[in-house]
Image (cartoon, helix red, strand yellow):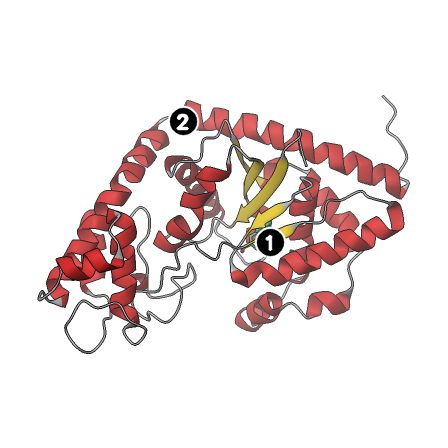
Amino acid sequence: MLNGKKSLFSGMQATGTLHLGNYLGALKNWVELEDDYETFYCVVDLHSITVRQDPAELRRKARALLTLYIAAGLNPEKNCIYYQSHVPAHAELNWILNCFTYMGELSRMTQYKDKASKNEDNINAGLFTYPVLMAADILLFQSDIVPVGDDQKQHIEITRDIAQRFNSVYGEVFTIPEPYIKRTGARIMSLQEPTKKMSKSDDNENASIFLLDNTDTIIRKFKRAVTDSGSEIIHSNDKPGISNLIEIYGIATGKSIDETMKEFEGKGYGEFKIAVGESVASMLKPIQDKYEELSKDKTYIDGVIKSNAEKASYFANKTLRKVQKKIGFPEKIK
Ligand code: TRP
């Protein structure tokens, strides 16, 4: 709890570009949470350097992500959108929590094992302790809920274990967070392999619609989308490709599955794919226009970055001071 409200924290890496799945499955729903929760959406640049980054690219992508969040509808006066590197408390709590985390539990993290096998030439200590930094992110804000994808559930579990371990020694310092995984949220599948989720780390650009793709690109990608055998526009389990397109079309136009099947009865895949592309392009257009407008307004974005980092620091430092005191670090002399 913060300010008498439940608290929500989520972090995102600036390394991939946001795609339609991120928007429809997460971002779009987050906008509705801003009145009920004290929310923190952090661009986790400290996490990003666990794999090598080009400095200019990292800076550019971090700013683009922060801007895109606002463009997609998160009001920065109500939602605290900030850079992790601007709030040193993340790194400070990370160190402390390192001393409450076991090598054994970290070595069981599936994401670590996966990333280590993909980056054999750079299995650094940061990659190993990545979940501890995540725990610090979440616990600094006394978060009640953490919206994440399924792949991050194990990291929320370890966060809970670390928090409980700490609390059992020092008393009720940390709120124990719950993962917030919206079952009803849209599950947008890859356009190239429709049995897999649309993913930031997919190497095939045609598999995903990025939020800043222009209309031509969007339509081209939908035209190339993998569909199933047959030619009818039918939603069914054995037609994952066309079913995915029907669902995307439904979200973009507000039409139900039945309405869509009726609308395209007797029509072919080709015509339907173009319609889906056009509907998605027009859904994303306002976000893209807003993004363009915001990108030009350096003063405004700089102001958001500064004021939100201050807000995040205020809450983070409160928790950090409490932790430091519990542990027995000497009080600062004022
Ligand atoms: N590891 C998360 C991801 O890759 C990003 C992240 C960092 C995060 N810190 C977090 C997510 C805290 C939720 C809460 O998606």
Q: On the image, which quarter does residue 190 sit in?
A: bottom left
Mark toward the start of the polypeptide (2 vs 1)? 1
Q: Would residue 44 be seen by someone viewing this image from the given angle?
A: no
Q: Position of residue 253 (x, y in %)?
A: 24, 48
Q: On the image, which quarter does residue 209 sit in?
A: bottom left
Q: Position of residue 24 (x, y in %)?
A: 38, 50
> In the visual, does 277 lie left or right of 68?
left
Q: Would residue 285 be seen by someone viewing this image from the given angle?
A: yes
Please rate how many residues cluster around mark 2, counting C-alpha atoms within 10 Å: few if below 14, some from 14 to 19, many from 20.
Answer: few
- Under mark 1, the amino acid is Pro
Please rate how many residues cluster around mark 1, counting C-alpha atoms within 10 Å: few if below 14, some from 14 to 19, many from 20.
Answer: many
Residue tagged by mark 1? Answer: 179
Residue name at image x 51 percent, y 29 percent: 78
Q: Secondary structure at mark 2?
A: helix
Residue name at image x 26 percent, y 44 percent: 283
Q: Answer yes or no: do the residues labelled 2 and 1 have beta carbons within 8 Å?
A: no
- Under mark 2, the amino acid is Lys
